[in-house]
Image (tube, rainbow, N blue to C red):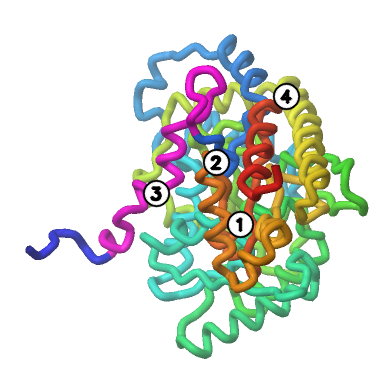
């Protein structure tokens, strides 16, 4: 029988029943569900949930307006004003944001899809450095039809000025082999999964590259305020500086610079489902996205709740300060645990929720005879062992890792939960 589905629908059949969603429906609890999964593979910050909920539950009242369509699909004027004021304070843009520079979506994934749709025709390219946040790929390609071009760096530091040449080579190779244009360069700044910030000089050179080829620079700054002090690793991590804080005069047409932000990470509230596209000098872009904004219409209740939070300057100041302290403490605990068990990780992080860890190397050390003939399959082997121990991590394979055996651990969990996850990881490797 001929399938009634389109080819693009067939291409994603099964993704809704992926392993991750199955694991999220079966969470571990030491008392009620000891046989559930310990999940340190999904980028959620639970460290501040109690603090945030205590505030929200004393502030939220709902006028009837928030049971209506509110101000429309691009975000309520009140929320966009609150976001603009909040981000002006924390991102230090050269040109202050106004509500007219912002378009609200029901999450940053929706914002990414909008941007991809607006900048590319099907088959055109978007540059993305490796390793990358794995969901960038479907966000930019499944429905918009863009081709994501993974940029390899080899032994070059992906945050260095030298890495800009890698982006240029990838751009030229794609255009030469396909005859199609590269339309955008996507950055995750601070970075997921490496937990580092791009230096200003690298950002400037990436802007120059984008200007040279008339490519849009998209800076996803969803972790902008989740920057913390690393007390464990040697060296001085690069501080965060927003793309909006860089003077573009003589560097790049400001109409090519765009920013994404949301409530999911910096406020540990993925479930609020609010993101924002910021473009200060490209009104045609925002007008185009307004035309399809109906499909990413955010909840009026979520908008009301976010506005309450963002308008309270005293609360957000305390929240960010305490969140940074907890992030630093949780990272230090997890990094020390890994060091104590001889597990390599990418040192020098100072932002976001992640440890990039080389579990494959540790497994080879513990099982040299078994792994002597294992190449890239080491990642699959370790993942199987982790799942047998009911602990879920994100595989570096899905994040475009250039080397096998690497995984991403999310450390932003209460201590008991994180310790259980790390214990199971060590057990899975056979070190206990």
Cα gap from disc 3 to disc 1, whole angstroms: 31 Å
For the residues labelled 2 and 4, say whether their Cβ atoms are less than 8 Å apart.
no
Q: Nearer the viewer, mark 1 or mark 2?
A: 2
In the displayed structure image, the side of residue 236 where residue 331 appears, left or right: left
Q: Nearer the viewer, mark 2 or mark 4?
A: 2
- First in sequence, mark 1 or 2: give its number: 1
What residue span does the magenta drawing correspond to? 8-36
Q: Disc 2 designates what residue? A: 389
Q: Residue at x 42, y 57 (%)?
A: 288
Q: Which mark is residue 313?
A: 4
For the residues labelled 3 and 4, say whether their Cβ atoms are less than 8 Å apart.
no
User: In the picture, residue 154 is in which quadrant?
Assistant: bottom right
Q: Disc 3 designates what residue? A: 18
Q: Disc 1 designates what residue? A: 258
- Indicate the position of residue 138 as horizontal and vertical percent values: 44, 59
Cα gap from disc 3 to disc 2, whole angstroms: 19 Å
Q: Quadrant of the N terminus?
A: bottom left
Cα gap from disc 1 to disc 2, whole angstroms: 42 Å
């Amino acid at each position: 029988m001929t399938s009634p589905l389109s080819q693009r629908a067939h291409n994603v059949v099964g993704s809704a029943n992926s392993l991750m969603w199955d694991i999220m429906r079966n969470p571990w609890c030491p008392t009620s569900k000891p046989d559930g999964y310990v999940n340190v593979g999904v980028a959620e910050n639970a460290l501040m949930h109690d603090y945030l909920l205590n505030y929200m539950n004393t502030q939220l009242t709902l006028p009837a307006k928030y049971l209506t369509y509110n101000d429309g699909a691009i975000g309520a004027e009140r929320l966009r004003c609150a976001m603009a004021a909040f981000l002006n304070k924390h991102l230090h843009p050269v040109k202050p944001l106004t509500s007219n520079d912002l378009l609200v979506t029901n999450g940053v994934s929706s914002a990414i899809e909008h941007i991809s749709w607006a900048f590319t025709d099907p088959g055109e390219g978007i540059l993305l450095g490796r390793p990358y946040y794995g969901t960038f790929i479907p966000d930019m390609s499944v429905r918009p039809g863009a081709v994501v071009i993974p940029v390899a760096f080899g032994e070059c530091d992906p945050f260095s000025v030298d890495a800009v040449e890698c982006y240029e080579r990838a751009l030229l190779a794609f255009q030469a082999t396909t005859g199609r244009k590269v339309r955008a360069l996507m950055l995750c700044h601070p970075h997921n999964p490496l937990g580092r910030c791009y230096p200003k000089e690298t950002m400037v050179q990436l802007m120059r590259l984008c200007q040279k080829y008339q490519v849009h620079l998209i800076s996803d700054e969803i972790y902008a305020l989740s920057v913390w002090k690393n007390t464990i690793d040697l060296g001085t991590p690069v501080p965060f500086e927003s793309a909006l804080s860089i003077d573009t005069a003589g560097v790049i047409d400001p109409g090519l610079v765009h920013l994404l932000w949301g409530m999911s990470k910096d406020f540990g509230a993925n479930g609020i489902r609010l993101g924002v596209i910021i473009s200060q000098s490209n009104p045609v872009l925002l007008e185009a996205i307004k035309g399809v904004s109906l499909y990413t219409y955010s909840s009026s209740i979520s908008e009301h709740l976010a506005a309450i939070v963002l308008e309270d300057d005293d609360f957000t100041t305390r929240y960010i300060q305490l969140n940074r302290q907890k992030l630093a403490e949780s990272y230090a605990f997890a990094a020390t645990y890994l060091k104590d068990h001889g597990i390599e990780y990418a040192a020098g992080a100072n932002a976001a929720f992640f440890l990039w860890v080389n579990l494959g190397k540790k497994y080879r050390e513990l099982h040299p005879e078994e792994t002597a003939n294992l190449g890239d399959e080491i990642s699959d082997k370790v993942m199987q062992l982790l799942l047998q121990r009911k602990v879920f991590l994100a595989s570096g394979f899905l994040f475009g890792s250039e080397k096998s055996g690497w995984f991403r651990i999310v450390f932003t969990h209460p201590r008991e939960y994180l310790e259980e996850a790390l214990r199971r990881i060590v057990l899975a490797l056979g070190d206990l």
